Image: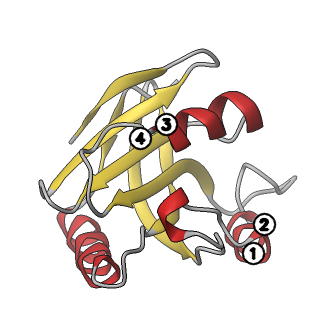
């Protein structure tokens, strides 16, 4: 389990810019985090953005299944001989705090959606928070 995740400044800024832009449409932004991991830590190397296909954008984010599959096909989440490590999910809250929402909790509990780090960016607070789903709850993790 990764307890510390380093996110380079340029990837943070790229994600923040996209979240700010999509906020004007009342939408969350979501992506798959790709990078390296080792002894309880990880390093983010890329964010592969995924389109929101939720009919009601106020209900949160539903990742486009085709885009998700394309984003993870060459990673440890899917491939037998992966080229990249799948680290987890990153998404924005365009009007809320950077903590798991009820939609996030339901997705984790009912659908078993989260494997690995789960990073949330709050647009109004301009803040990132990191979590890890342990099968029962979201545990806070350190972002570097």
Report, in whole angstroms, how far the alpha carbon at label 1 lies from the one at label 2: 5 Å
| Residue bearing the label numbered 2 | 73
| Residue bearing the label numbered 4 | 42
Q: Secondary structure at mark 3?
A: helix
- Residue at horizontal 24 percent and vertical 60 percent from the top: 8
Question: Any mark on residue 70, and which?
Answer: 1
Q: Secondary structure at mark 4?
A: strand
Q: Nearer the viewer, mark 3 or mark 1?
A: 3
Asked if the residues shown at circle 1 and circle 2 are in contact, with their CB atoms under 8 angstroms apart, the answer is: yes
Q: Is residue 14 left or right of residue 57?
A: left
- Residue at horizontal 27 percent and vertical 51 percent from the top: 96
Q: Secondary structure at mark 2?
A: loop
User: In the rendering, at what x and y percent does residue 37 appear?
Assistant: 49, 40
Looking at the image, is 96 positioned above or below residue 55?
A: above
By what rule are the colours in the image chosen?
Answer: secondary structure
Q: Earlier in the sequence, mark 2 or mark 3?
A: 2
| Residue bearing the label numbered 3 | 102
Q: Secondary structure at mark 1?
A: helix
Looking at the image, is 81 positioned above or below residue 40?
A: below
From the viewer's side, name the closer residue of 144 and 109.
Answer: 109
Report, in whole angstroms, how far the alpha carbon at label 2 lies from the one at label 3: 29 Å
> Label 3: few (<14), some or many (≥20) within 10 Å?
few
Q: Earlier in the sequence, mark 3 or mark 1?
A: 1
Q: Nearer the viewer, mark 2 or mark 3?
A: 3
- Residue at horizontal 48 percent and vertical 63 percent from the top: 58
User: In the rendering, at what x and y percent does residue 101 appear?
Assistant: 43, 40
Q: Is residue 60 visible?
A: no
Q: Earlier in the sequence, mark 3 or mark 4?
A: 4
Residue occupying the far right of the picture: 80
């Amino acid at each position: 389990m990764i307890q510390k995740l380093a996110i380079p400044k340029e990837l943070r800024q790229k994600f923040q810019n996209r979240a700010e832009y999509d906020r004007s449409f009342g939408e969350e932004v979501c992506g798959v985090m790709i990078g390296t991991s080792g002894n309880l830590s990880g390093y983010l190397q890329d964010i592969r953005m995924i389109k929101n296909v939720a009919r009601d954008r106020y209900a949160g984010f539903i990742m486009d299944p085709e885009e998700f599959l394309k984003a993870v096909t060459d990673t440890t989440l899917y491939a037998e001989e992966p080229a990249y490590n799948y680290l987890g999910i990153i998404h924005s809250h365009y009007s809320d705090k950077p903590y798991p929402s009820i939609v996030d909790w339901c997705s984790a509990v009912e659908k078993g959606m989260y494997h690995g780090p789960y990073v949330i960016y709050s647009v109004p607070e301009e803040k990132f928070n990191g979590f890890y789903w342990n099968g029962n709850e979201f545990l806070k993790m350190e972002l570097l």
